[in-house]
Amino acid sequence: MRIWPIATAAVSVVLLSAAVVGVDRASVGAEPASTDAGGAEREPVSVGVILNYLDDPFFVAIYEGLRAEAARLGVKATVRSVTSNAELTDQAAQLRKLVAEGHDCYVVNPITATNLVPALRGIRRPIVNVDSPVDPAAARRAGVRIRTYIGTDDLASGTLAGTHMAALLPDGGDLALVGGIADNVNSGVRLEGFERGIRGSRLRVVVRVNADYNRTKAQIAAERILRTHPSLDGIFAVSDSMVLGIADAIRGTGKIGEITVIGHDGNAEALNRIQEEGSISADVSQYPYVMGRMAIEACVAAARGAKLPARVDAPIALLTPDNVGRAITAFPQPVEQYSDPFRRLLRRQG
């Protein structure tokens, strides 16, 4: 277990021992960041955050976005995470500890659609769901109200990847699909979108595997696939942690340039592979840093009484050798402008 207190006044990060079960609130205090309409100082909003494992650059980017926005808005935030995406029960236990501390708002980034639902039961403060969605039916049965969901439109991003794969392989060919955790919602929807994107083309999917969002597992899976399907034309993976393992496997077989590889996330290392090496052909970039910033904005707006939109789609972009240089320069922010309804709400609140 890891606890990341965000000391917003000094914008410092403290990594505490796994034995620590509480946080000294004085160490994460913030100066009041704003005043109300009458000119009186507002108390800082306190936010409890539970994230997926922070050994993955994607979730680190969410954390960095949270950290930046907490500093900007003077939010007191306590961040907890787990050490792997297999720790479903422990993630729920960390959320219960956050709830016991008492916060004005909670940001949740569950490992699966249901593993945090029992721990969310009974929370009356606003809940902001980021990236991996909480199952709506399970939440309703438990009496859990999610104020807003912030994440990627996975069907649209998967479709974008599939459409681009079809454009890169106009004569058709054999494909492999690499998913994440078997019951992860995002993974399944991205794969569904990808297949929608290649519909009507001459491409056919000849193998599907799950690699648990793990680079090493994806590399091993790709090496096996390349042995059993030596004439494979393309691979799509639903995350860059896995697409990097696939690129490692392709490099090892000397087939760089022979297999079209498309990833999903916008991981900095994956973008460098597109620009410098060519072992990855394209990447559908989502922007976890933006998700993190929006999550803090949403919590502040909700804590001040604003009604939040039920869903906000974070920006996505197709990155290819033609535009990846600009994306690297802008990283971790999007190249293009994007809509942020939470910032508009905060402006209205003054």
Image (cartoon, rainbow, N blue to C red):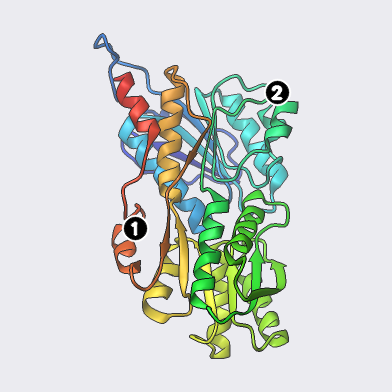
| Residue at (40, 65) in percent of width and height | 319
Q: Quadrant of residue 96?
A: top right
What quarter of the picture does the C terminus occupy?
Answer: top left
Disc 1 residue type (three-letter): Phe
Query: Is the residue 283 above or below the residue 14 in the image?
Result: below
Q: Residue furthest top?
A: 38
At mark 1, the secondary structure is: loop
Q: Position of residue 219 (x, y in %)?
A: 62, 75
Query: Is the residue 123 above or below the residue 163 in the image?
Result: above
Tell me: 91 left or right of 270.
Answer: right
Tell me: 137 left or right of 104.
Answer: right
Q: Position of residue 349 (x, y in %)?
A: 33, 19
Disc 2 residue type (three-letter): Gly
Residue holding disc 1? 331
Query: Is the residue 13 above or below the residue 46 in the image?
Result: below
Residue holding disc 2? 143
Q: Nearer the viewer, residue 338 or 221?
A: 338
Q: Quadrant of residue 335?
A: bottom left
